[in-house]
Amino acid sequence: MILWKTKVGIKELTKNNLSLSKNRKYMFKKIALVTGANKGIGYETAKQLAKEGVTVIAAARNVEKGKAAVEALKQQGLDVEFLKLDVDNETDIDAAFDYINNKYGKLDILINNAGIQLESNSWAENTSENIGEQVLRETLDTNFFSVVKLTSKLLPLIRKSNAGRIVNLSSILGSLNLHADPASPIYDSKLFAYNASKTALNAYTIHLAHALKQTGIKVNAAHPGWVKTDMGSDAAPMNVQDGAKTSVELALIDENGPNGKYLHLGQELPW
Ligand code: NDP
């Protein structure tokens, strides 16, 4: 009460009301964060989500490339904004939390898309005998540890959503069942660091989905397919438009949608 009578109090109240109404504006609009959105599947996912009416925070570690990508999406009339986020950088992760918390007060969709593949360009190789420790650590850092760190940091904001969705960009190459099966199409694709990083990510997906099963939040692993990107190479059979479909589908599932599953275009994969 006394607050109303002081100049400082009025200023404080006005400030609070303003930020409340700013957050209220986004109560009915979904907010998504897509990591590694400057190119490839991440860029296309940001585009397709924005076309579905989602406000997309397109994150990239390289400011110049990230801003250029967002500019191209804005030119198409899409509601997309840029955020600098190197998923391996803890300061960037903290700043992402602060930014989203201050501006939106919640996060509806987190697409953990950023990923690296540092081993051979040939998918038909087995690197397990000679894998360098540095490559193994770097790959697991970006594809696994950073996903856990970022997701854990943002979870309080995802809990504030009515229907939080977390999509982890895995790969069919993370499937231990298929790796152990000589008849499977990936039997000879044994890039150990990359594959192990996606297997670990799959384990996280199952564990987090279990931890959150009483909430409305759904956590799934997506295999995009073998997609023509810098990582997938020109040899890949799928275009990036189709490659983004699994991420987008899983981001937009309703309350009856899957939780703790490993999916490619609606089909379940063996873990
Ligand atoms: P690209 O190599 O085309 O893009 C990878 C994206 O991740 C880039 O934006 C890259 O940024 C970003 N990135 C890498 N490291 C970091 C980091 N530390 N912080 C922030 N961003 C980072 O790959 P795709 O689009 O093909 O792959 C997207 C996801 O899909 C990956 O997780 C990949 O493992 C997975 N996937 C892809 C398949 C395919 O066939 N293409 C098949 C199965 C899974 P920068 O431009 O700065 O390097």
Image (tube, helix red, strand yellow):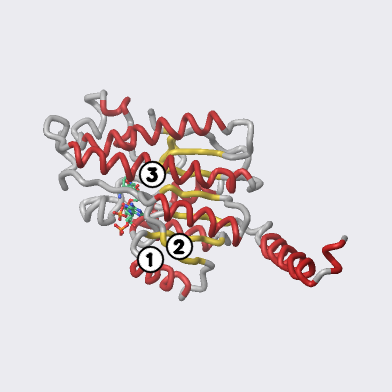
Q: Secondary structure at mark 2?
A: strand
Q: Residue 228, position in %: x, y?
A: 28, 54
Q: CA distance from mark 2 to mark 1?
A: 8 Å
Compared with 222, 181 (above or below) is: above
| The CB of the residue at mark 3 lies under 8 Å from ligand 1 | yes
Residue corresponding to mark 1: 66
Q: CA distance from mark 3 to mark 1?
A: 19 Å
Q: Secondary structure at mark 3?
A: helix
Mark 3 or 1, closer to the camera: 3
| Image quadrant where one finds the N terminus | bottom right
Compared with 39, 177 (above or below) is: above
Q: How many residues crowd around disc 3 within 10 Å: few (fewer than 14), some, or many (20 or more)?
A: many
Q: Which is more toward the observer, 23 or 14?
A: 14
Residue corresponding to mark 2: 83
Residue corresponding to mark 3: 146
Identify the residue at image location x=52%, y=48%.
251
Which residue, as the protein is rendered here, is positioned at the far left?
130
- The three-letter code of the residue at mark 2 reads Leu
- The three-letter code of the residue at mark 1 reads Gly
Q: Earlier in the sequence, mark 3 or mark 1?
A: 1
Identify the residue at image location x=82%, y=63%.
3
State which quadrant residue 170 falls in.
Answer: top left
